[in-house]
Image: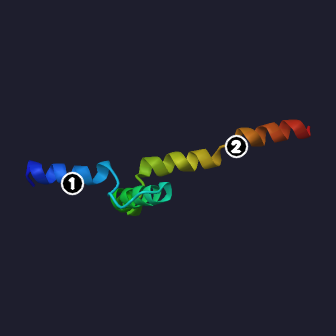
Amino acid sequence: MDNKDSNAKGAEFRSAPAGVNSQGEKEDWIGRQLRRVFDNSLSEPLPDDIMSLLDRIDDEPSLSDSKADKGAA
Protein backbone atom coordinates (compact mmCIF):
# COMPACT_ATOMS: atom_id res chain seq x y z
CA MET A 1 0.00 0.00 0.00
CA ASP A 2 1.49 3.34 -0.91
CA ASN A 3 1.31 6.53 1.12
CA LYS A 4 -1.63 7.91 -0.91
CA ASP A 5 -3.76 4.84 -0.10
CA SER A 6 -2.78 5.10 3.55
CA ASN A 7 -3.84 8.75 3.70
CA ALA A 8 -7.14 8.02 1.97
CA LYS A 9 -7.95 5.22 4.40
CA GLY A 10 -7.02 7.42 7.36
CA ALA A 11 -9.23 10.23 6.07
CA GLU A 12 -12.16 7.82 6.00
CA PHE A 13 -11.95 7.54 9.80
CA ARG A 14 -11.33 11.23 10.54
CA SER A 15 -14.74 12.65 9.78
CA ALA A 16 -18.22 11.49 8.95
CA PRO A 17 -19.27 11.54 5.30
CA ALA A 18 -20.93 14.68 3.96
CA GLY A 19 -24.42 13.09 4.02
CA VAL A 20 -24.24 12.52 7.79
CA ASN A 21 -25.80 15.62 9.34
CA SER A 22 -27.71 14.94 12.53
CA GLN A 23 -26.17 13.96 15.86
CA GLY A 24 -27.89 10.57 15.72
CA GLU A 25 -26.55 9.87 12.22
CA LYS A 26 -23.04 10.79 13.38
CA GLU A 27 -23.32 8.49 16.38
CA ASP A 28 -24.53 5.65 14.13
CA TRP A 29 -21.62 6.27 11.74
CA ILE A 30 -19.12 6.27 14.63
CA GLY A 31 -20.62 3.03 15.95
CA ARG A 32 -20.28 1.36 12.55
CA GLN A 33 -16.66 2.49 12.27
CA LEU A 34 -15.84 1.18 15.75
CA ARG A 35 -17.48 -2.16 14.97
CA ARG A 36 -15.43 -2.42 11.77
CA VAL A 37 -12.23 -1.88 13.71
CA PHE A 38 -12.97 -4.00 16.78
CA ASP A 39 -15.21 -6.86 15.55
CA ASN A 40 -12.25 -9.20 15.01
CA SER A 41 -10.90 -8.44 18.48
CA LEU A 42 -14.22 -9.28 20.09
CA SER A 43 -14.18 -12.79 18.65
CA GLU A 44 -10.67 -13.54 19.94
CA PRO A 45 -10.37 -15.46 23.22
CA LEU A 46 -9.09 -13.62 26.29
CA PRO A 47 -5.50 -14.44 27.26
CA ASP A 48 -5.12 -16.91 30.13
CA ASP A 49 -3.60 -14.32 32.49
CA ILE A 50 -6.61 -12.02 32.02
CA MET A 51 -9.02 -14.91 32.61
CA SER A 52 -7.10 -15.82 35.76
CA LEU A 53 -7.35 -12.25 37.04
CA LEU A 54 -11.09 -12.12 36.33
CA ASP A 55 -11.58 -15.43 38.14
CA ARG A 56 -9.70 -14.12 41.19
CA ILE A 57 -11.81 -10.95 41.23
CA ASP A 58 -15.01 -13.02 41.05
CA ASP A 59 -13.83 -15.20 43.96
CA GLU A 60 -13.04 -12.27 46.30
CA PRO A 61 -15.89 -10.81 48.36
CA SER A 62 -16.81 -7.32 47.24
CA LEU A 63 -16.65 -4.26 49.46
CA SER A 64 -20.43 -3.91 49.39
CA ASP A 65 -20.77 -7.49 50.64
CA SER A 66 -18.41 -6.75 53.55
CA LYS A 67 -20.31 -3.58 54.50
CA ALA A 68 -23.63 -5.43 54.39
CA ASP A 69 -22.26 -8.12 56.71
CA LYS A 70 -21.03 -5.51 59.22
CA GLY A 71 -24.34 -3.65 59.13
CA ALA A 72 -26.29 -6.81 59.84
CA ALA A 73 -24.31 -7.58 63.01
- Check if mark 1's residue and mark 2's residue have beta carbons within 8 Å: no
Q: Is residue 44 visible?
A: no
- At x 38%, y 62%, the residue is 39
View extreme (right): residue: 73
Residue position for label 2: 61
Colouring: rainbow
Q: Which residue occupies 70% across, 42% down?
A: 62
Tag of residue 40 = none
The percent coordinates of residue 65 (x first, y second) are 76, 43
Q: Residues within 10 Å of mark 2 (few under 14, many from 20)?
A: few
| Secondary structure beneath label 1 | helix
In what element is the residue under mark 2?
Answer: loop
Closest to the observer: 20 or 38?
20
Vertical placement of 61 versus 23: above or below? above
Left or right, residue 71 beside residue 35: right
- Picture quadrant of residue 45: bottom left
Q: Amino acid at mark 1?
A: Lys
Residue 27 seen:
yes
Return the residue at label 1. Answer: 9
In primary-sequence order, the first of circles 1 and 2 is 1
- Residue 54's place in the image compared with 45, above or below, is above
Quadrant in which residue 1 is drawn: bottom left
Q: Position of residue 7 (x, y in %)?
A: 17, 48
Residue at screen point 75% across, 41% down: 64
Q: Please tell me which residue lies in front, 24 or 71.
A: 24
Q: Front-most of 33 and 72?
A: 33
Identify the amino acid type marked 2: Pro
Measure the alpha-carbon separation of dots 1 and 2.
47 Å
